[in-house]
Image (cartoon, helix red, strand yellow):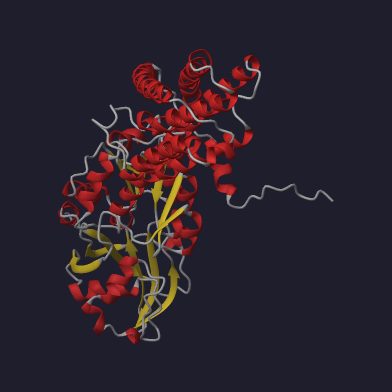
Amino acid sequence: MDVLVTDKTGTLTEGRISFTCALPVDPLVSKDELFVLGLVSTEADYSSGTVSMVGQNPLDAALWEAPQAVGFEPERHRRLGLIPFDHTRRMSSVLVADAGGAQKIVTKGSPEDVMARCINIPDQAQALLNVQYDAGARVIAVASRPAEDMSALGPEDEQALVLAGFLVFLDKPKANAKESLVELAELGISVKIATGDNARVAQKVCRDLGLESGGTLLGTQIDGLSDPELTAAAGQSSIFARVSPEQKARIIRLLRQQGRAVAFLGDGVNDALALHQADVGISVESATDVAKDAADIVLMDKDLGVLAEGVREGRRIFANTIKYVLMGTSSNFGNMFSAAAASVVLSFLPMLPGQILLNNLLYDTGQLAIPGDRVDKEQLLAPSHWDIAFIRRFMLLFGPISSLFDFATFGLMIYVFNAAPGEFRAGWFIESIATQTLIIFAIRTRRVPFFRSRPSGGLLWASLGVVGLGIYLPLSPLGAVLGFDPLPIPFFLALLAMTVLYLVLIEFAKHWFFARQSQEPTRQRIRGSAHRIHRRAARFSAATTLNQH
């Protein structure tokens, strides 16, 4: 991935929301009364006197866990109706009757949405709200109005409310979040925040963590933008505030269409849409079942540092995989070309089938150490992608170079040493093992091998061991059984000179190849709907033909 879209709560912050204070703006409402209004407007069932935290949203749970909630008297507040919170209205409302039978509507939710339904808002209310936002606090507004003779409650009744005040909550930034953001930036990953919270709160948290903001888009602004306009704006913006689940999914879809590899980190039911739209859907063990089922990856800990380490390890694995693919395709192409050419001009097989299998067995055994090899730092700084055209060009350049030295070996064995078939096969067997095994040290890095890029100890000793065994077998008592004849000593001196010359030529060819590669235009990677559908369907697909009857 090269873009991570994530929520703020629990990712950049600790995710432990605590109630801090009540700020009345109505002179007729005290702090305690405002707090009680907040309690009765939650979706929790308090009629039995015991409130369960299961299924509660974090803000409601923080209210019930506050010390002030201990003195709440449920029998004095009889609930008659409830409109649950939703991401369109961004508020919840209740119809309650007090001990004297007086009824009223109490609405709690996003300050912007609640205040839009209020009348006669005090002048100091917005200034008081802005102070809390600038401090990075999460705030919900509480409003009410009398509702006598009402028996049912609907969204149309959330009008002509009187603002009672604000309930303030705190969610501290994570101690290691800043360090994790630096790690992601070093990996070339742009972090974008998609939150239902206020924009000023999100901006304050991002400033505290040193996350540079490329701009902020509000949910209301997103609805007014066409897809091309939002595509341009989403590429620049780093904060999306007051966004709905549908808006999150739309943002991710448009980012993907820019050719970006987009990951989304979410843990709620409403994140399922965005998780399905992302190239990589990421959730956490503590998330809802819906979010975990929609995700590709489930983290045991909601920590961006864990995610950064996963990205680094994934890129290391991919880089080592490509090493093997490049080496295997070029070496095998060269060997097949050499064997085909030799079979045309020689009166005997250049290598017996069993010897070819032994050659491949030794060669592949040495490559078992590649997964543990070191990877150059620059290979971890940006995502790498499977590019079959690149692999083909690499194979067509380095395969023939390998064949050139095979042909040199053929000429040496026939015209200099007048080799018999057994000697010829032993000579090519040893030369093939030495060149195609040692080439890994040149292919594994774009730098100068050993001097500027050291291989892992496992790869070094495995490769040298395979070359040593490849040289020993034709000379050992098993040589005759395997179809090899002893070789003269001068051959090994020539082999050493050819191997050194081969590795030097490979190094020059490598620098020319990658210099030419860097000059080629970068193709834009655009993932259409088919990419996402096939990837999502893969886990449920079976590679069998369905019975048509």
Q: How many marks?
A: 0
For residue 462, above or below residue 32: above
Instruction: Identify the residue at horizontal 36%, vertical 84% (top origin).
Output: 50
Q: Position of residue 269 (x, y in %)?
A: 45, 59
Front residue of 545 and 505: 505
Q: Position of residue 194 (x, y in %)?
A: 34, 48
Q: Quadrant location of residue 339?
A: top right
Q: Can you see residue 326?
A: no
Q: Position of residue 97 (x, y in %)?
A: 37, 79
Instruction: Identify the residue at horizontal 41%, vertical 71% (top origin).
Output: 55
Residue at far right of view? 549
Front residue of 323 and 534: 323
Q: Which quarter of the image is occupied by the N terminus?
A: top left
Q: Quadrant location of residue 333?
A: top right
Instruction: Identify the residue at horizontal 40%, vertical 86% (top origin).
Output: 48
Q: Position of residue 316 (x, y in %)?
A: 36, 42
The reply, left or right, for residue 417 in relation to residue 315 is right
Front residue of 181 and 269: 181
For residue 510, above or below residue 250: above
Front residue of 345 and 323: 345
For residue 524, above or below residue 299: above
Q: Can you see residue 93?
A: yes
